[in-house]
């Protein structure tokens, strides 16, 4: 069946938009990453891989691994909090589920930068947390929370937790309750049903949530700037400084390309997990 002129126009317009505003900028970033830095023109020929080699210098490698560690900690905490939350929300009635989703979406009505400043006020030496702890007699003097690794992980977790919960809720909605009941009837305990049925079938949501949280966490330079100080940097801080302060565009582009590669690997992981779940479903159908 031939496509209508309007549909063909929409497809061409969409592809042109993606090519101009998605593909072209990424191509320029990759191209810049293999060029030579120049004070006057920012990036010039000849082609070189020096920028990629510099990533593994001790100074930048430490920041790179520290960024991965901070992002991984925030992702793990989001998973530990988001998984039971998604399970509880998925078991609620439609009205209560809509209300809980509304409460989860409310923070997005305020810019994340403003919310980060609010976290800074909460964690300060004279902030709400220290005031409450002193008031109930837990501590005698304020605890240094701000400008620490704890503050960065706390900020990342607070901002990105909804991104973990949403795909998990979707996975629990698609979970076949008959399989859980069958496991119960066959004598499987709670943890056996969770490990052999619930966790494998919700793994696409787990991987998707980790993907959505982990990658943005490495790039949220303003969270590290406001809550972590100069000792707790993320990959986004290096990229920002290379483009705006040092003016070494090839090096900043090399870090950006590295982040894109990590994203590609995690997307492949999500695809593989989703395929595995589909194969498990096919095997269950055949056994039935």
Image (cartoon, rainbow, N blue to C red):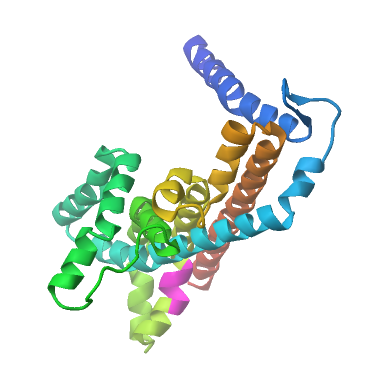
**Residue with the most extreme right position:** 46
In front here: 32 or 108?
32
Q: Is residue 243 one of those drawn in magenta?
A: no
Q: Main secondary structure of the magenta part?
A: helix
Q: Is residue 56 left or right of residue 114?
A: right
Point out residue 41 in the picture as x, y percentages from the top left corner: 72, 20
Answer whether residue 198 is magenta in the image.
yes
| Residue 171, picture quadrant | bottom left
What residue range appears in magenta? 195-200
Vertical arrangement, residue 178 with respect to residue 110, above or below: below
Where residue 211 sits in the image (x, y, percent)? 51, 53
Name the foreground residue: 226 vs 27. 226
Q: Is residue 5 left or right of residue 136?
A: right
Residue at 48%, 51% (x, y): give it. 217
Name the image quarter holding the N terminus.
top right
Residue 247 in the figure: left or right of residue 50? left
x, y percent for residue 259: 62, 46
Residue at x 22%, y 76% (from the top left corner): 140
What residue is shown at x 47% (from left), y 72% (from top)?
288
Q: x and y percent of residue 133 in the render?
A: 20, 71
* In the image, farthest residue toward the top: 5
Frontmost residue, 256 versus 228: 228
- In the displayed orientation, state which residue is furthest to the bottom: 187
Evaluate whether residue 167 shows in this view.
Answer: no
């Amino acid at each position: 069946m031939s496509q209508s002129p309007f549909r063909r126009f929409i497809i061409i317009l969409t592809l042109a938009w993606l090519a101009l505003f998605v593909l072209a900028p990424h191509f320029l970033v990759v191209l810049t990453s293999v060029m030579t830095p120049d004070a006057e023109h920012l990036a010039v020929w000849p082609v070189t891989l020096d920028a990629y080699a510099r990533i593994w210098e001790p100074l930048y490698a430490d920041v790179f691994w520290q960024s991965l560690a901070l992002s991984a900690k925030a992702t793990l905490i989001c998973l530990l909090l988001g998984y039971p939350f998604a399970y509880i929300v998925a078991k609620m009635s439609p009205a209560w589920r809509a209300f809980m989703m509304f409460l989860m979406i409310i923070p997005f009505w305020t810019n994340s930068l403003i919310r980060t400043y609010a976290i800074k006020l909460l964690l300060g030496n004279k902030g709400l947390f220290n005031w409450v702890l002193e008031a109930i007699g837990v501590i005698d003097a304020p605890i240094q929370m701000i400008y620490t690794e704890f503050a960065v992980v706390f900020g990342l977790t607070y901002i990105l937790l909804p991104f973990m919960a949403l795909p998990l809720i979707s996975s629990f909605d698609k979970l076949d309750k008959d399989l859980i009941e069958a496991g119960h009837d066959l004598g499987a305990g709670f943890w056996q049903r969770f490990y052999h049925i619930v966790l494998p079938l919700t793994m696409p949501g787990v991987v998707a949530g980790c993907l959505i949280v982990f990658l943005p966490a490495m790039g949220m330079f303003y969270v590290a700037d406001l809550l972590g100080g100069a000792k707790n940097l993320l990959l986004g801080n290096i990229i920002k400084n290379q483009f705006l302060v040092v003016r070494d565009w090839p090096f900043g582009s090399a870090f950006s390309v590295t982040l894109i590669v990590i994203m590609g690997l995690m997307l492949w992981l999500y695809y593989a997990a989703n395929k595995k779940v589909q194969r498990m479903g096919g095997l269950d159908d055949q056994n039935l």
